[in-house]
Amino acid sequence: MRQSRRTNFIIVASLLLIAVVFAVYVTLVMKWIAFPKTPASSLTADAKVAAEAALERARLGYRDQFLDPRAHLRLSEALWKSGRQIDSFYVQYAARQLFSAEEFRQAHADIVVRIGGPAAAVRARLKGLVDPATTVPVYAEVARDYPSTPEGRDSLEQLSVLAMGPEGSDPARLARTALEELYRADPKNPEKLAALAGAAFGRGDDQQAFALAEEALDKNPGHAGAARIQGMLALKSRDHAAALKWLTAAWDRNPDDLYAAAKIAQIYDKARGDAESALPYYLALYRQNPDYIDEQTAENRIRETLDHRREILLKGASVEALGGRFKLSDASLRAQACVRAAAYKDPRWIDALGDLLDDDAEIVRRNADFALYEIAKANPEAVRARRDSWLSSDKPLVRIRALNLFADLDGKNFLPAVLAALHDPVPAVRALAKIMVLDHYYVENPQAARAKARYLAQEKDPDARALLKRFPPTRR
C-alpha cells in the first residue's frame, strides 16, 4: 500500500511537472503568435498583394546582386514591410558581417533611413552657419516642408534642443517661436507636438508639457505625440505601468517614434525582465539604427533572445513534426528546425533542407548545410545523390552552399568541382568559392593555391574584388 501511494505520488508529481512545462511552452508560443502588430497587419488586401510582389522582386534582386549591400537592405526592408520582422533582422545582420562598415552605412542610409533628396538639399544651406537667427529658419523650413523625412525629424529635434535654453535667450526664443508656429500649422503631427512639449519638459517645465499634451488629447484623443509626452512624464515619476500604457499608445499610432520604442524596450527588458516582450521594439530600433546600444547592443540582445526562444520552442519537436517548421515565417525557428534535423539525421528531410540552401537568411542556409552534413554521416549516398543537381542549380545560393557542403564531405575528391566554380558566371559564386571553400578546406593544397592565384589575377568584377579584399586568407 505504501509503495502504491509512493508510485501515485510520483505519477502526480510528474504530471504536474509536465503541466508546468507545457504552460511555459504555451506562454512562449502565444507571445510569439501575439507579436505586436507588424507593418503588414494594417494593410488592405491590395496593399498586401503589392507588399508580397515587392518582396519577390527584392528576393530576386538579392540573389542576382548578392555582392551589392543595397540588394541585401532592399530585401530586409521588403521583409519588414511584409510583416517578417525577424527575417528582416537576420538579413540586415548578415549584411553587416559581409560588407565593410562604410559600405553598409551608406546602403543603410539610402535604403532604410532614406537620407537625401530635397530635404537634404535644404539642410545643406546650414553649412557654415552658427547664428541661430540664420539656422533656426532653415530647421523650421525643413520641418515644415519635409516632416516625415529623417532630415525633418532631426530638424525638429535641433529646434527642441535650442528651445530648452534659458528663458529670454535669443536662440531659445527663436526656436520656441518656430516650434509653436509649426505646431499651430499642423496640430495633428505627433513629432511637432512632441518637439514643442519636449522642449518644455527638457527645461523642467513639466506643467506646460502636461498642458500641451492634455490639450492635444482633448482635440485628438489618439494623438501619438501627446501620448509620448504623457509617457515621458510618467517615466519621470517612475510610474512604469502608466509609462508603458502611454508609450505603447504612442508607438502603435506612430511607428517612427523610436523614443517610445527605446523606452518600452527598457521597461520590459530592464524593469520587468521580459526580453521576449521587448524583442519587437529592439527589432524596430535595430532596423533604423543597427548601432543602437543601451548597456548592450540591440543586435546582441535580439540574438540572445531569439537563440533562447527558439531552443525552447523546438526543444521537443519530433522528427515527424519538422516538415512544417522548415516553412515557418520566422528565420530563427527555421534555423532551429535545421538543428533538430541534424540531431535526428533522418534522410526524409534531405530535399526540404536542400530547398533551405536558398533561404533569404544566411543563418538558415548555414544550418541547413550543417544538417545535410550530419545526415550524410549516417546516409552518405542519400545526400551525395543530390550533389550534381545542387551544383548545377539555377539558384546561386544553392550552388555556394553545395560547394561548402561537399568540400566538407569529400575533401580532395571534390577539389575539381570547386576549381570549376571559380569560372561560375555569377561573381558571388566565384568569390565565395574562393573565400568559403578554397581558403578553408584546401589551405595547403598546391593545386588549389595555383588556381587561386590565377583566379585572383583574372577576376574583373569590382564587387567580387572588393569582397576578396575584405576577406583575405587567414594564416594557420
Image (cartoon, rainbow, N blue to C red):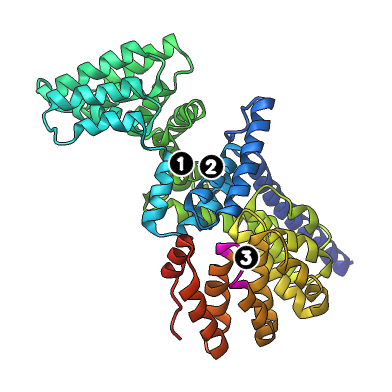
Residue 282 vs residue 454, the one in the foreground: 454
The percent coordinates of residue 426 (x first, y second) are: 59, 62
User: Which residue is located at x 57 percent, y 41 percent?
Assistant: 78
In reply to whether residue 423 is colored magenta, the answer given is yes
Q: Amino acid at mark 1?
A: Val
- Which residue, as the protein is rendered here, is positioned at the far top? 219
Q: Is residue 445 visible?
A: no
Image position of 170 with respect to 52: above or below: above
Precedes in sequence: disc 2 or disc 3:
2
| Residue 237 appears left or right of 27 | left
Q: At 48% across and 48% down in the image, what residue appears? A: 70
Range of residues picked out in magenta: 421-428
Residue under label 1, please give it: 112
Q: Amino acid at mark 2?
A: Glu
Local SS, label 2: helix
Mark 2 and mark 1 residues within 8 Å of each other at the beta carbon: yes
Magenta segment includes 46: no
Side of 116 where 269 appears, left or right: right
Bin the neighbour count of mark 1 within 10 Å (Cα to Cα): few under 14, some 14-19, many 20 and up. Answer: some
Residue at which label 3 appears = 366
Figure check: 349 above or below 385: above
Q: In the image shown, does 274 or 221 lie closer to the viewer?
A: 221
User: Are dots 2 and 3 in contact, CB under 8 Å?
Assistant: no
Q: Nearer the viewer, residue 118 or 144?
A: 118
Q: Main secondary structure of the magenta part?
A: loop
Q: Position of residue 376 (x, y in %)?
A: 76, 76
Secondary structure under badge 1?
helix
Can you identify the residue that label 2 sits on? 77
